[in-house]
Amino acid sequence: MVTVLEVKLTQKNGFNGVGVKWVGTHEQAANGELRVLLHEFKQKIGQIKNVVHNDAIIGVSYTIDENSFKNYFVVETANCQEVPDGMECISIPSGLYVTSYYNGYDTQSEYIKLFQWIEENGYKYNPALHSLEFYPIEYNPLSDIPKLTIYLPIKEVQKDKDGGRS
């Protein structure tokens, strides 16, 4: 079965999120550590005050180096007041994103396709912002096939005076 990459450009407003932090390697993530953390976080969402949207959990990734990254699982909140013990509040700035819904086990291949789409369509990945993953609240990370909407931050490529891209 061939799946067609359905890509949308989305201007996302900035937001605050309260949740849990994880730091580790891509190998640790592939071995299920993030799925376990997401499951544990779902059990604690009720402790969070001022939730704006309760239909999704947002994964926010920060690259540390080629082998490791920092990840937060958060819910969007109105502010950063009354953060429960063991959780943190982060602020995500507004930005332009390329988005795609994915349902399957090979999430990495979806990222590769999105990066190819970005390059082929006159955009560049914007490392000043952070990749986001939106998981439906009903998703069970320990038993369900992964379901998420991927948001990769992008910026338009500047054209030089000759019409070429720089």
Image: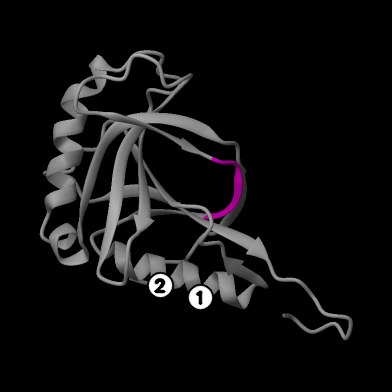
Q: Which mark is residue 112?
A: 2
Give the residue number, with chain letter if any, for mark 1. Answer: 116
Q: Is residue 158 left or right of residue 20?
A: right
Left or right placement of residue 12 versus residue 74 in this view: right
Q: Residue at x 16, y 25 (%)?
A: 43
Q: Secondary structure at mark 2?
A: helix
Q: Position of residue 155 (x, y in %)?
A: 64, 61
Who's the residue at 31% across and 67% down the image?
Answer: 108
Going by the numbered disc 1, the residue's amino acid type is Gln
Q: CA distance from mark 2 to mark 1?
A: 6 Å
Check the image and tell me how it is coloured: one colour
**Circles 2 and 1: CB atoms closer than 8 Å:** yes
Closest to the observer, 97 or 145: 97
Up-down relation of residue 61 to residue 159 (above or below): above
Examine the rendered structure and indicate whether residue 95 appears above or below residue 56: below
The three-letter code of the residue at mark 2 reads Ile
From the image, give the main secondary structure of the stretch colored magenta.
Answer: strand
Residue 104 in percent (x, y) is at 27, 58
**SS at badge 1:** helix
Boundaries of the magenta span: 93-98
Percent coordinates x, y for residue 158 in the rendering: 76, 71
* 30 over 46 or under it: above or below: below
Q: Position of residue 132 (x, y in %)?
A: 42, 48
Q: Quadrant of residue 46?
A: top left
Q: Is residue 61 magenta?
A: no
Instruction: Tell me what residue is drawn at x 16 percent, y 41 percent.
Output: 37
Nearer to me, 20 or 117: 20
The reply to whether the magenta stretch includes residue 96 is yes
How packed mark 1 is, by other alpha carbons closer than 10 Å (few <14, some 14-19, many 20 or more), is: few
Question: For this rendering, which residue is in front, 144 or 35?
Answer: 35
